[in-house]
Image (cartoon, coloured by chain):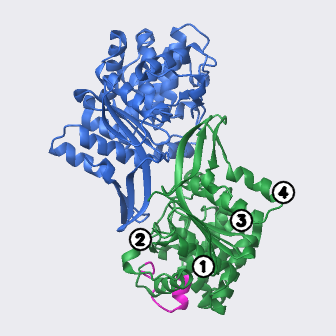
Chain colours: A blue, B green
Amino acid sequence: MSDPVLVNVFRGRQVESRHHGAVAVLDADGEVLLALGDIDRPVFPRSAVKAIQALPLIESGAADRFGLTSAELALACSSHSGEQRHTDAAASMLAKSGHDFTCLECGAHAPMAAEAAADLLRRGIDPTAIHNNCSGKHAGFVCLSTALDVDVAGYVGPDHPVQREVKAALEDLTGVAHTDAIRGTDGCSIPTYAVPLRSLALAFARYGTGQGLGSARAEAAERLRRAVAANPFMIAGTGRLDTRLTELFGERLFLKTGAEGVYCAALPEIGLGLAVKCEDGTKRAAEVILAALVARFLPLDTAGEAALQPLVRPALTNWRGIEVGSLAPADALAS
Amino acid sequence: MSDPVLVNVFRGRQVESRHHGAVAVLDADGEVLLALGDIDRPVFPRSAVKAIQALPLIESGAADRFGLTSAELALACSSHSGEQRHTDAAASMLAKSGHDFTCLECGAHAPMAAEAAADLLRRGIDPTAIHNNCSGKHAGFVCLSTALDVDVAGYVGPDHPVQREVKAALEDLTGVAHTDAIRGTDGCSIPTYAVPLRSLALAFARYGTGQGLGSARAEAAERLRRAVAANPFMIAGTGRLDTRLTELFGERLFLKTGAEGVYCAALPEIGLGLAVKCEDGTKRAAEVILAALVARFLPLDTAGEAALQPLVRPALTNWRGIEVGSLAPADALAS
């Protein structure tokens, strides 16, 4: 079964490209408020579940033991752009647990932010694992491993105590057994497990409300959500959608992007969780779908509506800055 | 109607993402040898038709008047990576017609080749229009405009004599009237016209065989195809698919990528033209589709088959170089 077209890409008056996708919006009781496409097909959430993967960092006491700041907790949930404040915070987290970037097992890549990448080149500095967009999450894993008093080396392995804790949190929130059969390896080398979009939306409804979670876990989730809301820059970076929407809506919206066209979000005030998979893995379409869902479900004033509009229907410009087209949600996404 | 899934993206054993698309394979008489998806829906060919857009450069006598080399003719058909040999050739074409990069109207962007872009940054040089992947085509337009003895300024406009000549060539090859209603603006600011995939495949069958073309046009097409075959680096750049396949197959395969998931190709020895549109506009999928079609239609020896295999089923590796998945043609593409 094919997922419906959710985003059209226009050039002039013609549709140039189309993006298929699936969407699940659920409350914490598992009631489905919106289902587009196949919400029972397994999806790798990739980085969209980093805030769930960070729960053991709080629950273990590691965050308090090492005195992690609110900005550092936000970074532990982030896919950051590798800007100076991001890499400084990751280095600080590692230092607090007695480590440095050489123990990171996420691999090196140039900062996602073009200006930060250019700055390294101009200064003749090679990117290291600290610039990897996942270095905050990994620094959190290193803190957790240290607090658990186990060998940090190999912390990305599926059988390492860190990844066992992380998997248990994912299983609790999604309600899905994370077996080896559904395991893949993520870009940053940790395990990622393919679970139905329905279960991811449920997990975020729980994450945003605390419903269905133990009290310590519910408190940890709230602490992480508040840390991100207080530090929008740390969850992504300059100009990125997660940062912009967190700046706009604060604690009213927790959202997180994942590679290959995934978004997960919680809307705590209305008790909903949502999960998006753009079938072709394209970021531009996943962003439009997410923005359209926020516009549809989050109660907005006129200013909020106006701020969302350019994200729901972004203009496309060419190399000379001429507007040549736009992206727009397809009919299936309209309320 | 939805186009079929043509490419699956695997992570571990699971399908992570899927790409829909359409394919047309025709001979120069218009007979359809393969149709997947809707081949009558209009598609913007974007840069995939640069070799057609370069025909007036030959036919007008401009190429001979200015003594353009075979490498420069290949560059006129290219979406180049902005490496030194590319920008040198574009500058040479402009100089031969009495101009320099300041007359280019394609806009500036950093070289597509990461190493060339990094080199500019290290040297503190801002990219100009000469680094634009379309600068060879635009240098050809400047030569044509000069040979036509008309004002070069505004050569990207749909009513400029250069674009009128280009449009006439496109209409002749595709057999489709290029009206204002189907016109969009390309990334490099020239017009691009949405025409059926069927007509694009027909155009390339004609381009590869000369069938259905006037003799001067057929000769111009052959001259451009040979120029590209003799200069594979000039059509794209280091590591790029168009360059690699042209190195492998020379005059047996003329192929050209276009933005938003388009490929067009001619297989002269068997008289076929083919056109690909990945519905979501993704390059990675368009490349797999193109490679799979070449493997299916071009008679290959064992070495050719072996060389194509990693392009038909490319491996996906993560930041540490660990193989985490692969792309593979879907069943609909299998012969």
Instruction: Report whether A306 appears left or right of B144.
Output: left
Which residue type does callout 2 highlight? Thr
Identify the image quadrant of residue B24: bottom right
Q: Earlier in the sequence, mark 1 or mark 2?
A: 1
Label 1, label 2: how many angstroms apart (C-alpha)?
A: 28 Å
Stretch of the chain drawn in magenta: B142-156
Q: Which residue is mark 3?
A: B297
- Mark 3 neighbour class, 10 Å CA radius: few under 14, some 14 to 19, many 20 or more: few
Front residue (pair B218, B105) = B218
Looking at the picture, do discs 2 and 3 lie on one chain? yes
Q: Are marks 2 and 3 in contact (CB under 8 Å)?
A: no
Using the image, name the chain to which the residue with label 1 belongs.
B
Q: Earlier in the sequence, mark 3 or mark 4?
A: 3
- Mark 2 neighbour class, 10 Å CA radius: few under 14, some 14 to 19, many 20 or more: many
Check the image and name the residue furthest to the right: B302
Using the image, name the chain to which the residue with label 4 belongs.
B
Which residue type does callout 3 highlight? Phe
Mark 3: secondary structure: helix
Mark 4: secondary structure: helix
In percent of the image, x 63 and y 54: which residue is there?
B288
Mark seen at residue B302:
4
Using the image, name the chain to which the residue with label 2 belongs.
B
Is residue A12 in the magenta section? Answer: no
Q: Which part of the image, by quadrant, shows the C terminus of chain B?
A: bottom right
Q: Are marks 3 and 4 in contact (CB under 8 Å)?
A: no
